Amino acid sequence: AGSVLYGGNIDNCILDCSNMPPQYHHLCTHSSGKMFNISTAISNDDNSTSLISSDPTIVCFCNVSDPFVCLNNHHAPVYVYPGQQVSVSLMALGQRNSIVASIVFMWYLDFNTILNSALQTSNYCNVYNISVSHEFGAYLLFISTEKTFSTFADIMNITAIPITVQSCPLGFSLQNDSFGPVCGCSEQLQLHGFKCYAADQSIISSPSGAKWISIVSPKVIGIVDNCPFEYYNTSLETFSLQNPDKQCQHNHSGILCGQCQGNQSMMLGSSQCTSACSNTYLLLIIPFAVMGVALVGFLLAFDFTVANGTINIFILYAFVIKSNAYLFFSPSCNPVMKILSVFIAWLNLDLGIETCFYEHMESIGKVWLKFAFSLYAAAIIGAIVLAGRISTKISRLCRYRIIPVIATLILLFYSKMLRTVLIIFTFERMDMSNGKHQLIWTYDGSKEYLVDKYHIALFIFGLLVTIFFIIPYTLLLLLTPYLMKLSHWRVFSWINRIKPLVDSHEAPFKDRYRFWTGAMLVYRIALVIASAYFSQQPGLILFMIIIVHAGIVFSGFAVYKNWIISAIETTLHVNIIINSMAIYFLNLEGHDFPSDFKIDDCLSSTISIGVSFICFFLILLYNTFKPLRVWIKMKMEYFQVNENVVQMPVHNEDGDQENREPLLNE
């Protein structure tokens, strides 16, 4: 309300200027000092509305960028869906076109019913959101200062907005709530756990998992219940079917977020997409080749092989962490965790660093490259074996040093291949709104499973690796103790030819536990299958990890001959158990989906991997100083023998006396 005048006919007002404060003397312009000049109070400045007000006479549209200027009382046609809101900039005017704060009335007229509603305006232009809860059709929204019309002037002062209520968009259906008809989630979306917000036609992300939804063809919606966590935006709350890529992270897009946005390329060592790639990065083949040779040299130099059991548990630990990276690695990990993740990556024959490789690399090419380094490691193994056949010296070296290294490389190669093959074999079912469904490749939904020619080629290669390497290698190490008993049979005589390789795997174990490496391979297979097909139930995966490792610890199995190795393995088993329990009880208890990690900066996994790295480093130091200790011991024994030698006096040909060692020491 005005601070000077309010209401009535204000065109001719008598004002006692003798008692007016000095700041209002400019209002008294009449010579008698009694006449109030209304024109002095009506202005475009912010203070005009605080001086005078009256009953509202008209409602007009305005612009918030110029909040004291009335535009007109005509509005362009508006197209909305049932339950959606119309944003309108309004203000009410009183006498002398002064802006007033008042109640205005809205009329929804469809020529059958008239619905009344009221709206409180401010003393300046403001934006108001008006819900339209009507079924499909054309309507007029009338806005007036009067609830009833008594004169023609009242009718002429009505402000109207033409509104067309359209049919619900794809994915929505007409439903009734307490406010009237609205567009809500279709039955298909509701069955998959989605919720919809009618006001802006947005979809609320399903709380029950990384569920992906989008328009896949005209008038057809596709829904997949399991989007890869490394691609899915787990912090997503709402999105629109017109912008489905909001469900993706790391610049991914497309079906199941399996592609990169625009002309970007996928990176090795992470799930990121970037536009900074070029074919110049192909030169990285050179350092990659050197890394393979360096790996062999490292295993030889530090005797870090499966034959002495020092690396077995570290390979298993890294496999468990890497296979469930979405559980053990939070997107907001601290710098220490990022460094430790390189340690985990290297034990899985991964790069551990983000890098491009070639321009426009897609998921298919990235999987082929995962095979490439493993195949290169296999080529190094083949070269060593071939060199052993050609050179006798290398053959003798192979017998005592290289064969354990080859066995270690094969175990690393196995873990890498197993995870890669599961990536190829994994598929998802996409349910479509037309009642059909389609099988698509999990890591690039644009590739129809076993229909796309590029996926078929990848699938065939993965199948060959499974049939001729993964399955035979697993069965060999699991059943060797029993097959060796049958090696005298001709059909099993081939066992004797690979016995040195098998012995390298079994050497650190007690005789009754020589199957242990094979049993851990079976556990790896079960774990990657669970991680691939039960990723929407992380609690189940963590429970499986806890049960298996707790069973190993509490069963009291002392599988290694060396008690130090047994103690280190027990330590890492307990490490995995504690880390898994911490993640479950502090993050996932009561939740189906790891959308929000409560542990700041991956504290639990940082400590866990840090402990494993310290153990690894200590083993490395032990293996480094072990040859030195052996050399020192040999030298000490040599000097001790020389000190105990008895000198025998003899005469040479010239008659001179000499001291010589006796042929036999006493």
Image: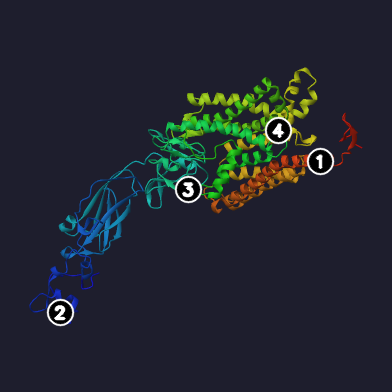
Amino acid at circle 1: Glu
Amino acid at circle 2: Cys
Q: Which residue is mark 4?
A: 518
Is any atom of residue 145 visible in this view? no
Front label number (3 vs 2) = 3
Position of 424 with respect to 10 (left or right) is right
Position of 613 with respect to 11 (left or right) is right
Horizontal and vertical percent for residue 572? 68, 45
Which residue occupies 48% across, 23% down?
453
Q: Which residue is mark 2?
A: 17
Position of 183 with respect to 141 (left or right) is right
Q: Are marks 2 and 1 in contact (CB under 8 Å)?
A: no
State which quarter of the image contains the N terminus: bottom left
Comes first in the chain, label 2 or label 4? 2
Front label number (2 vs 1) = 1
Q: Which residue is mark 3?
A: 235
Horizontal and vertical percent for residue 438? 49, 30
Comes first in the chain, label 4 or label 1? 4
Marker disc for residue 637: 1
Q: Are marks 3 and 2 in contact (CB under 8 Å)?
A: no
Comes first in the chain, label 3 or label 2? 2
Using the numbered discs, state the Cα–Cα distance from disc 2 to disc 1 in whole angstroms: 122 Å
Comes first in the chain, label 4 or label 3? 3
Using the numbered discs, state the Cα–Cα distance from disc 4 to disc 1 in whole angstroms: 41 Å
